[in-house]
Image (tube, rainbow, N blue to C red):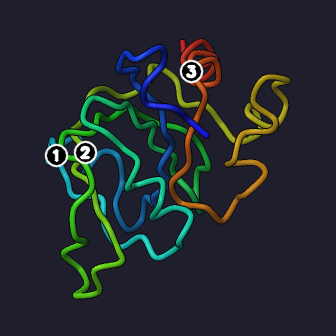
Amino acid sequence: MFPFFINGESKMRYWLAKTDPDTYSFDKFESEISTVWDGVRNYQARNYLNEMQIGDLVLIYHSQTSKDIVGITEVTKSAFQDPTTDDERWFAVELTFKSKLKKSVTLNQLKNDDLLKNIPLIKQSRLSVMPLYEQEYNRIMELSN
């Protein structure tokens, strides 16, 4: 669905990952600089984790409370066995802090934007890890400035 190679050349991909800020906030992420993104127990989200490559950018969305995209991270280690389980079917990735957004992008902004109203966050709201097309990522960056 989201090719990593286009015309034989490697291409960065874009993702969105959700976290409950009461459990793991982006401020805590920033203070730790890097984290293992683990504990995902949805098969589709797991498959997306497995597709992530080093250098891919991941937007972090605060679910539950503020419901907004708050920052950017980068994949610094691709899929490996999730350390929170012995079940080899589950993966984790390492993410490293890149930056906070100047202005968070709310769920309402996403729903009301013609380019973003069909992203997986809106259409598959329970999914915790999802891909974004480059133009969707770029539009979110525009909204955050």
**What kind of element bears circle 1?**
strand
Q: Earlier in the sequence, mark 2 or mark 3?
A: 2
- Closer-to-camera residue (63/95): 95
Q: Quadrant of the C terminus?
A: top right
Residue 97 on image: x %, y %: 24, 36
Q: Nearer the viewer, residue 27 or 128?
A: 128
Residues under numbered marks 1 and 2 in contact, where contact means CB atoms less than 8 Å apart: yes
Q: Is residue 29 left or right of residue 32?
A: right
Q: Nearer the viewer, mark 1 or mark 3?
A: 3
- Is residue 104 depicted above or below 38 in this figure? above
Image disc number at residue 106 = none
Which is nearer the eye, 57 or 31? 57
Mark linked to residue 95? 2
x 27%, y 29%: residue: 55
- Residue corresponding to mark 3: 134
Q: Earlier in the sequence, mark 1 or mark 2?
A: 1
Q: Residue at x 44, y 43 (%)?
A: 60
Q: Position of residue 142 (x, y in %)?
A: 60, 12
Crowdedness near tag 2: few (<14), some (14–19) or many (≥20) residues, C-alpha within 10 Å: many
Residue at (76%, 48%) from the top-left corner? 122
Which residue: 41% across, 33% down? 71
Q: Is residue 113 above or below residue 145?
A: below
- Amino acid identity at mark 2: Leu
For disc 1, the neighbor class at 10 Å (few under 14, some 14 to 19, many from 20) is some
Residue 10: % across, % down? 35, 21
Q: Is the residue under label 3 in contact with that under label 1 (CB below 8 Å)?
A: no
Instruction: Find residue 34 and name its label.
Output: 1
> What's the distance in space between the residues labelled 1 and 2, CA to CA?
6 Å
Question: Real-space Cα distance between discs 2 and 3?
Answer: 19 Å
- Specify which label sits upstream in the sequence, 1 or 3: 1
Label 3 secondary element: helix
